[in-house]
Image: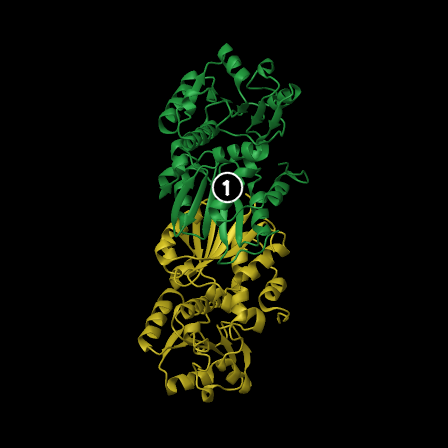
Chain colours: A yellow, B green
């Protein structure tokens, strides 16, 4: 239940083609309500031919922000007046801020995921070696932010060159060329710390030396819920295993990692932190973590 | 309070430039709720330069209908795929039905007002003589529907020619030429029963013979609340005096008419019946009168 929308209410919405099951409306409205803000968030399925008219119309209506999801994360870019540098490098936008008819695009997928690792698991990105599987959209976002963190640490530490140590970001993908291309781009634009891997003994060797192992593919999500991106015999005790998938909450990959003695983090963390970042972008305020987590995941406590 | 908007919710909205005080959202949402329909109605102020983008965008979003108010009732016509014949004659649209991206325009101002006279006061339009003051948008709408009712009766009665009897519609306006032009148009297109009047003894003479006296000007509404379109000495016992204004509920015109012993009807009737017609256009269902009236006018009973 929400209070009625009036002429001053700032509307926000998630736009895609198949978003009936999105948990974002419950999460974002709980946050607005908690802070007593006159904002409202709702879901909208838009046909591909209609996206252009809808985005132009929304920019002139009483909207303050949008969450953009599949298949519009790339297409939306051409309607923006401004784009955040990270989103530009990723080449995809999932969050839009609307102010005076002007649209500014952001990508919170990578930042949300990485903040989850930092805030919920205390990971120091600069000091950790990562193996990431998958080179699709979410992977690009995560890789870009991981590399940005290393670049920032590099600059701060002034002299300690991350590209010369082995705390790098290793990217494994079924099509090696795609991993190679993404790494080359990030090495040029962000930080020279990304290394593509072949899916063979090379992968096994780098997982052995890694601190964090990330699944950024859709393997583990229906209809692939009985599959895993990494053979269980490659997983060792001491890794933090992280998955971008939140449904199921524990993918086959995370189950195997837990059995091997790893600490794990699932896609709930990404969803929550990405929502918090969008909330901050739209309202300028810190998001209320606990009510947001509760609204999406029920009575479960959000563990720091 | 409303239930949350989901991907299946049919949105409806009132669009204008200054609609903060509109009573339509409360009225329409009460009706949707009463029938358990997954519709939601909210107000939106749109800048004049933005109307075109907004109307195109809305036609591709999850909207089922719009109420169009000042200053867009004429401009909206060029975005319609279809227009109701009465709205076309009136030359203004205040209600739009949206289906599969197609927009059909209606005008419910005249029909709402006339149904109010019929349903709430038992007026038989064909058998009554009307004096209407004002030749602006609302007057055009009312005149068109009054004339249509007479035309329909004319056809039904097959032989009794309304244009030859004196149960006509007399139109008085400060600028005589405007009244003359509107009458000429309606006499041609709808029914030969409209007569323009000069604001002098001619007006007095026709009010004397009239059954219903209608104020369709904004005289009586702030900042003109101390003015009246008709001198009180022209009003006689036996008239039904009707005003399109609902705020104040009793204009100076209605007060004077009541003092003279007339039955009166204020703009609440127009607002309610127009809302009921829009509800029917959008949902196909009969609107729940009592809850709608209560939502707008509080605890007052809706008197038949």
Tally of numbered tags: 1
Q: Residue furthest top?
A: B201
- The residue lying at 41 percent from left, 22 percent from top is B163
- Residue A246 visible (yes or no): yes
Q: Residue furthest right?
A: B299
Give the vertical position of A135 relative to A202 (above or below): above
Give the vertical position of B262 relative to A232 (above or below): above
Q: Position of residue B148 (x, y in %)?
A: 43, 31
Q: Position of residue B51 (x, y in %)?
A: 42, 40
- Residue A63 visible (yes or no): no
Considering the numbered disc 1 on the image, is that residue within a helix, a strand or a loop? helix
- The residue lying at 39 percent from left, 62 percent from top is A71
Q: Quadrant of the C terminus of chain A?
A: bottom right
**Seen in the image, is B113 located left or right of residue A181?**
right
Compare residues B172 and A58 and report the one nearer the observer. B172
> Dividing the picture into quarters, in which one does residue A78 lie?
bottom left
The 10 Å Cα crowd at callout 1, few under 14, some 14 to 19, many 20 or more, is many
Query: What's the chain of the residue with tag 1?
Result: B
Q: Position of residue A42 (x, y in %)?
A: 51, 56
- The residue lying at 60 percent from left, 31 percent from top is B247
Would you name the residue on which mark 1 appears?
B277
- The residue lying at 62 percent from left, 69 percent from top is A302
Q: Residue furthest bottom?
A: A233
Give the vertical position of B193 relative to B30 (above or below): above
Q: Position of residue B249 (x, y in %)?
A: 62, 30
Compare residues A70 and A167 and report the one nearer the observer. A70
> Dividing the picture into quarters, in which one does residue B156 lie?
top left
């Amino acid at each position: 239940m929400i209070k009625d929308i009036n002429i001053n209410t700032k509307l926000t919405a998630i736009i895609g083609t198949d978003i009936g099951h999105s948990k974002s409306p419950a999460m974002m409205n709980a946050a607005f309500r908690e802070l007593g803000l006159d904002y409202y968030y709702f879901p909208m399925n838009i046909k591909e031919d209609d996206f252009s008219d809808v985005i132009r119309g929304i920019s002139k209506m009483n909207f303050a922000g949008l969450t953009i999801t599949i298949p519009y994360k790339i297409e939306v870019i051409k309607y923006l007046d401004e784009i955040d540098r990270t989103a530009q490098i990723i080449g995809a936008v999932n969050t839009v801020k609307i102010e005076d008819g002007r649209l500014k695009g952001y990508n919170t997928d990578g930042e949300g995921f990485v903040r989850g690792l930092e805030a919920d698991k205390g990971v120091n990105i600069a000091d950790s070696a990562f193996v990431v599987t998958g080179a699709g959209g979410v992977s690009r976002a995560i890789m870009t932010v991981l590399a940005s963190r290393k670049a920032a640490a590099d600059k701060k530490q002034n002299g300690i060159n991350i590209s010369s140590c082995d705390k790098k970001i290793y990217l494994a993908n079924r099509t090696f060329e795609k991993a190679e291309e993404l790494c080359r781009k990030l090495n040029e634009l962000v930080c020279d710390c990304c290394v593509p891997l072949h899916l063979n003994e090379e992968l096994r060797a780098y997982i052995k030396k890694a601190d964090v192992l990330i699944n950024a593919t859709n393997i583990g999500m229906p209809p692939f819920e009985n599959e895993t991106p990494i053979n269980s015999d490659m997983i060792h005790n001491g890794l933090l295993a992280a998955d971008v998938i939140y449904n199921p909450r524990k993918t086959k990959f995370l189950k195997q990692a837990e059995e091997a003695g790893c600490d794990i983090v699932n896609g709930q963390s990404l969803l929550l932190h990405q929502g918090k970042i969008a909330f901050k972008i739209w309202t300028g305020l810190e998001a209320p973590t606990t009510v947001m987590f509760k609204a999406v995941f029920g009575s479960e406590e959000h563990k720091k």
